[in-house]
Image (cartoon, rainbow, N blue to C red):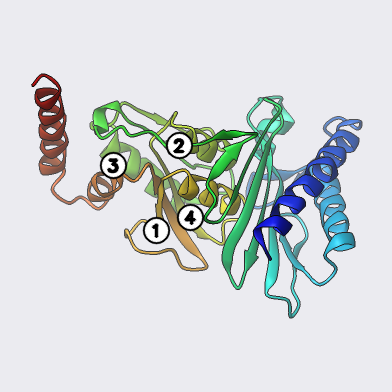
Amino acid sequence: MTSETLHHLYDYLIPLVTGAYREASRYSVQGIEKKELNDIATFTDRFMEQAIVEGIRQRLPDHTFIGEEYGENRGESPYEWLIDPIDGTVNFAAGIPMFGTTLALRKNKETIFGIIFDWPNNAIYYAIKGEGAYCGTMKLRVSQRSRLDESIVSICLTSSYNAEYSGKVLDLIQKLQPHVRGIRIIVCTVYELIWLATGKSEAMINVKPSMGLSSCAGKLIVSEAGGKVTNLSNKPRQEIDDLLITNSVIHDAVYNIIAQKDTDKIVHATDSFHRELSSNAGT
């Protein structure tokens, strides 16, 4: 697909996805069903995913789809869509204004286009690989904070986590808390990645390996805004993997803390770097 085609696709998706959300919203929060452990899905999740898939198929009939609610519908095409119709469903059902819709287009497993609809704030974020990340016409940029004690980190802890993954999250919190300005658990991946791409936070962690339906678009958006994406071993992510995303500046420092490697050295290094910057500014 050419850049021009992807821009046309962006223009096509906005009324399609917005229309599906508005239609689903007419029915309020209905049809809540239990999923894994205490996780849930609503009528809105199911209605929107079906409407989005049908709308894209009308324009791109050979493309395949992987959705949060209806699973995989794969074919021979190198193009596939990863869709989470409502990321942050528990927030959405409870009336907490932190949820959104996320779509990503991959070609041969490489994400080339991603878009996030932030419904509570009426904002749309998107990225085309190699062309930067945007909210409307505003180009996005991650923060340049280099000090851990000035950095905010978000960690995913969902109602679908079993004792093993919940324990990993609690362990990470204990490791990170002494070193960072704040830790946030909001259970909405699209918001966590929007915050990162717009410089409001500096890192995001997900300990549960997955394909990343809710994070696929956001990972591209953060990368195009200057961030860095790896797994928790600080290696390139595999198809099913855990996740560490940062503003890139503090990436190695966060990794060393969660891997329990020379945390004192890392903190002193960032302090020295800050003092050096201050000294140079005064000369």
Frontmost of labels 3 and 4 is 3
Choose the circle earlier in sequence order: 3 or 4. 4
Q: Residues within 10 Å of mark 1 (few under 14, many from 20)?
A: many
Closest to the observer, 58 or 173: 58
Is residue 60 positioned above or below 114 on the image?
A: below
Question: As drawn, is 270 to the left or to the right of 226?
Answer: left
Q: Amino acid at mark 3?
A: Ile
User: Is label 2 in a helix, a strand or a loop?
Assistant: loop
For the N terminus, which image quadrant? bottom right
Q: Amino acid at mark 2?
A: Arg
Q: Which residue is mark 3?
A: 250
Occupied quadrant, residue 112: bottom right
In the picture, the disc for residue 231 is 1
Q: Residues within 10 Å of mark 2 (few under 14, many from 20)?
A: many
Question: As drawn, is 242 to the left or to the right of 25?
Answer: left
Q: Amino acid at mark 4?
A: Lys
Q: Which residue is mark 2?
A: 141
Contact, mark 3 vs mark 1 (Cβ under 8 Å): no
**Cα separation between marks 3 and 4:** 22 Å
Q: Which residue is mark 4?
A: 208
**Cα separation between marks 3 and 1:** 15 Å
**Cα separation between marks 4 and 1:** 11 Å
**Cα separation between marks 3 and 2:** 15 Å
Single out the residue that lies furthest toward the bottom. Answer: 76
Q: Position of residue 185 (x, y in %)?
A: 48, 33
Residue, x 86% and y 30% (percent of image)? 28
Question: As drawn, is 191 to the left or to the right of 8?
Answer: left
User: Is label 1 in a helix, a strand or a loop?
Assistant: loop
**Cα separation between marks 4 and 2:** 27 Å
Contact, mark 4 vs mark 2 (Cβ under 8 Å): no
